[in-house]
Image (cartoon, grey):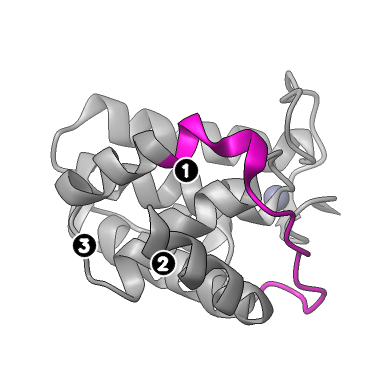
Amino acid sequence: MINCIGCGAEVPDIEYPAHADMRTSPGCWSLFSELLDREFSSPEYWPAHQLTVNAYALQHSASNPALHLIALCLRFDLGFSDDRILPVMRRASKAKESLPSVEAPSAPNTVTVLDVCKATDAKEHIAAVERWAKSVWDSWSESHGTIRALTARL
Ligand SMILES: [Zn+2]
């Protein structure tokens, strides 16, 4: 086992195709791929999908963290459903070149992809993804002011 270079989770030390745009270890990327398989193969798991992608991207230095934070702000601050989040994200994506840079938190992650892997059914999966994404949003608290101001203008 090794610690993922992105999220710090203890993951299997395996060979696996890496992802070009994120800072992640192969074992962690393979676990994330399993979660995506669940979500793509069963409509019961699908409601978790947007949060899964945003939480994982933010824990693995994706190239546009502000974009993922806007999605979490809409969800956790404003209580938006995916239906309402998507049009705002489309507007935000068009402006992504001008989004401000935000600094990743330095504290270790308390919830990771591993916590979602433990779920045994769709209900547990969705609840675990909610906890994961909420913990990610909370961990970026130093950027909340910037992201809230940005979200208000979208
Ligand atoms: Zn990781």
Placement of 144 over or under 18, stated as above or below: below
Label 1: element kind: helix
Q: Nearer the viewer, mark 1 or mark 3?
A: 3
- Identity of the amino acid at label 3? Phe
The residue lying toward the viewer, choosing from 141 and 57, is 141
Q: In this view, does 83 lie to the left or right of 71?
A: left
Q: On residue 80, which mark appears?
A: 3
Residue identified by numbered label 1: 53
Q: Is residue 100 part of the magenta span, yes or no?
A: yes
Q: Is residue 38 left or right of residue 55?
A: left
Identify which residue is drawn at 55% across, 69% down: 136
For label 3, being within 8 Å of ligand 1 is answered no
Asked whether the residues under the numbered discs 3 and 2 touch, taking CB atoms below 8 Å apart as contact, a structural biologist would say no
Label 2: element kind: helix
Asked whether the residues under the numbered discs 2 and 1 touch, taking CB atoms below 8 Å apart as contact, a structural biologist would say no
Identify which residue is drawn at 14% across, 34% down: 43
Placement of 19 over or under 35, stated as above or below: above
Q: Specify the segment rendered in magenta.
A: 92-109
Q: On residue 33, which mark appears?
A: none
The answer to which quarter of the image holds residue 24 is: top right
Measuring from the top left, give residue 82's x and y in whole percent: 21, 48
Measuring from the top left, give residue 30's x and y in whole percent: 62, 33
Label 3: element kind: loop
Q: Distance between the residues labelled 3 and 2?
A: 9 Å
Asked whether the residues under the numbered discs 1 and 3 touch, taking CB atoms below 8 Å apart as contact, a structural biologist would say no
Measuring from the top left, give residue 72's x and y in whole percent: 42, 62
Q: Which residue lies furthest to the front in this view?
A: 153
Q: Which of marks 3 and 2 is nearer the N terminus?
A: 2
Q: Is residue 110 part of the magenta span, yes or no?
A: no
